[in-house]
Image (spheres, helix red, strand yellow):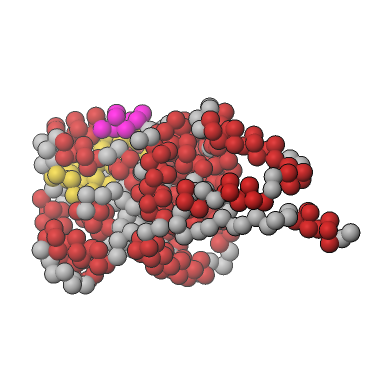
Amino acid sequence: MSQPNKFTHDADAIAFDVKHRNTIKFNISRYDAGVGKGMARYNNVELAKRQAAAIKRDVLQNWGNYLIQFEEKISARGVKVLWAKDAAEATTFLEQILLDKDAKLLVKSKSMTTEEIELNETAERIGCESVETDLGEFIVQVAGEKPYHIVTPAMHKSKGDIAKLFNEKFGTPIDSTPEEMTEYVRQVLRKKYTTAQVGVTGANFLIADIGGISVTENEGNGLMSTSFPKLHIVIAGIEKIIPSMTQLGLFYPLLAAHGTGQQITAYNTIFTGPRQANEVDGPEEMIVIMLDNGRTTVFEDDEAFEALACIRCGACLNGCPVYKTIGGYTYDTTYSGPIGSVLTPFLRGFKDFSHLSFASTLCGKCVEVCPVKIPLTDILLANRRKTVEQNLRPKAEKWLMKGFKLISSKRAGFDFVPSLLKNVGTYPFNYVAWGPNRKMPTFARKSFSQQYKIKNK
């Protein structure tokens, strides 16, 4: 089944799953309440967003210079920097590192970039157990699933779902409370932290002027993942760069407020290298893999390049009516929602993923909530145009649009077809296109223009 057909099939199935919709509605309602409080703390949130957007646009104007500065600064403290042009090259680097270290266990903090290159599968393939340490990531890993959401990986699961999963996998009580399940996971992970040879993190921000890796998280698992293992591996997208450490004072609260509604994330750590001569703790070695994997392709596009300003807060997903209807898994890609629909055709090819740019109502909610003012709807429209120009849309669609143009270009075209034929022609939509819970409206015997003429004779 092709990706577009799979998307349509999966969307049809999940859109009318009442349990799924209720779970997502509940979880996003709690997010909305939290974000409302987070925004209320700002005196002028629009000003903060404009400042953040300006910084990220400056980055895109001087991208190469900031990346070189970052590499020079962090390399000076003994960090090895590797540049991966794609997921395959990043995987090759990772495999070689793990084999050289004879690593049998690695612990990993939450990172969408590692999902992008399928790090867990790579590690397992060469005999190294990879353990997710973020609670949400741990849950979906145990379930054999991928993250459902950029920020909240297990958003699609209720506490009852998780209790049932843990009962099946670990034998914990079926009626376990969230607190009891969290404590169980905490005890499991502590043993993993202290025995792992390798700790892996992503990067929320790469700080050019100090050569630092900024990681933000709420559970302390990122710190634990890098405190005990002798090797710390960072896998970071090259778009995560910001010019100065002083700018974190702007970005930390924006990311937290838009991502979870917090004033600031609980744990904010800056890694600048492995253990130095005058230090008593920390990893003995640190390696940073800088991942391109299609990002420069986005950068080269005059219309889509601003999507690289994204700070992965997830706000556009939570605001998107399409995402809330079809869920994260229907997109079948690492990044879902509006930002995923914009980026994925460039990262994984327009041929297979251009349909995602059509998975939007263009309501503009994603643009409204974006903390760095990415013109997502404009880019979605541009992607649609590129898709048509590359002849990637179904041929039937082209003829249908020509037919619609012929009918709708003049009022007489609408009035020419009798209402009976209109109703017969649209009747199949009740079963084929709109699903069982909606019905096409019935056309009146006379059109509005005909009724208007009769009334105003």
Regarding residue 285, the answer to whether it shows in the image is no
Magenta stretch in the rendered image: 82-91
Q: In this rendering, would 101 be left or right of 376?
A: left
Q: Nearer the viewer, residue 327 or 444?
A: 444
Indicate whether residue 434 is drawn in magenta.
no
- Looking at the image, residue 280 sits to the left or right of residue 70; the answer is left
Which quadrant, please, contains the C terminus? bottom right
Q: Nearer the viewer, residue 210 or 30?
A: 30
Rendered view: 425 above or below 157? above
Q: Residue 424 in the image: state x and y as whole percent.
A: 58, 49
Task: Say which residue appears at 64% left-offset and 51% top-offset.
Answer: 420
Q: How many marks?
A: 0
* Image spot of residue 327 (x, y percent): 39, 53
Left or right of 355 in this view: 284: left
Q: Farthest residue toward the right?
A: 457
The residue sitting at 10% across, 63% down in the picture is 171
Instruction: Say which residue appears at 38% left-offset and 41% top-offset.
Output: 6
Answer yes or no: is residue 92 visible.
Answer: yes
Residue at 29% x, 65% y: name it: 158
Image spot of residue 52 (x, y percent): 53, 51
Image quadrant where residue 406 sits: top right
Residue 84, magenta (yes or no): yes
The quadrant where residue 256 appears: bottom left
